[in-house]
Image (cartoon, rainbow, N blue to C red):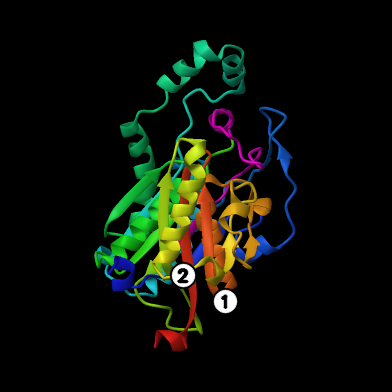
Amino acid sequence: MNSLQAKPVYLVAASVFNSAGSECADLHGSAPVAHVLDFPPGPLAYPVTVPRLPTTVFDRKIQRNVEPQGARLLYCAGRMAGPLNNLHLAGERVALMAAIPEVDGPSSCWEAVQAIAEQPDALLAQLFAHTPPLHALMMLNSSVMAYVAEALHCHGPMGGFCSQSNAGIDALIEAVEQIAGDRADAAVVVSSSPNLSPALYLRDSTQSPPQADASLYGEGAAALLLTSRPPANGTHALRIAGFARGYSASPERSSAVAQRVVQQTLAREKLGMRDVARIVAAPGTPFLPLLFADTQAIFHSSRHMTGDLGASALLTEIALALHDHADGYTLLLDHSRAGHWGAVLLANETTEKQA
């Protein structure tokens, strides 16, 4: 018996912030207009302004002490304060998991990026050699997590994951395991995208093979609230029914890894692909026709509304799934340019089934 079978984990609240808006329903609205970045002219992006933090949750001075990606994360986290308070849990039983993207290198001006393009062998290694070391990265991000923990009274297990899109599924899985293992009764999962900067462009331009929509960047954040109990009100509950992840640096192995991740995710519920009603995956995800040939599921993606949100992409899609209450099972697939694969299975259940 796995931990998910031992103790179910439910999604009870979510918040988002991106170019589409600050409500999950905004992701079904009209697509925003993409902008040309001010450092190379080619890529398009969906930038956002820095949100104002809720002063009922955070001290005003925090707004001046965090950079934009941290402010986006705090904004979404602050909106979880009300739903979390309604659970009436001791702070020691509330876990906090964060998916925070890499911090830009110290020289993020476009002139430096142009110089690297002209002399890549001479300068690329030098730039990476001066990026923040791991301990400095963790210290910088831990201050943002400390703000969240203090404001929301999350005094239970804590973990931070610093990477690209795979950080989102890492944070989610850890939160689920903390609840399923009875080390917490609830968990707040927060995430943010990288800032739109030359360092982001340089990082993504070194990854291969590129995704079809690799030039459409985005900025945003998302937060989820998970508990061991389904919502007290309403007729629907969204349960985390399965998950899996895998990695291969070899493009030749990527398809096999993706198939294994999907199969492992469905195996927790003893499902086949024909049992899945909805599949959420970015349009540029490799091997989509191969992976889902045996299904009549509806495909969906919010990428055209948000751009690539990196570490917060998966949690944004999960937040939308909670809002939509789609019947049956929803399978979300995540793929990073570095070769990481992750999948999450959501089950929409009625209160009669929970009883």
Is the N terminus in the top left, top right, bottom left or bottom right quadrant? bottom left
Number of callouts in the render? 2
**Location of residue 268 with respect to 245 vertically, above or below:** below
Give the image location of residue 301, x and y in percent.
Answer: 63, 57
Q: Quadrant of residue 3?
A: bottom left
Say which mark, if any, is on residue 244.
none
Where in the figure is residue 183, as x and y percent of width and height?
24, 64
Q: Quadrant of the C terminus?
A: bottom left
Q: Residue at x 61, y 13 (%)?
A: 118
Q: Residue at x 44, y 22 (%)?
A: 128
Q: Nearer the viewer, residue 209 or 73?
A: 209
Quote the CA–CA distance across marks 2 and 1: 16 Å
Q: Is residue 261 in view? A: yes
Residue type at tag 2: Leu
Task: Using the image as rendered, state which of residue 326 and residue 92 is in the foreground.
Answer: 326
What segment carries the magenta color? 197-224
Question: Does residue 316 belong to the magenta stretch?
Answer: no
Using a 10 Å C-alpha cutoff, classify the residue at mark 2 as few (fewer than 14 neighbours), some (14 to 19) or many (20 or more). some
User: In the drawing, does residue 329 fall left or right of residue 265?
Assistant: right
Give the secondary structure at mark 1.
Answer: loop
Residue under label 2: 271
Which residue, given by chain and number where applicable, does mark 1 sit on? 327
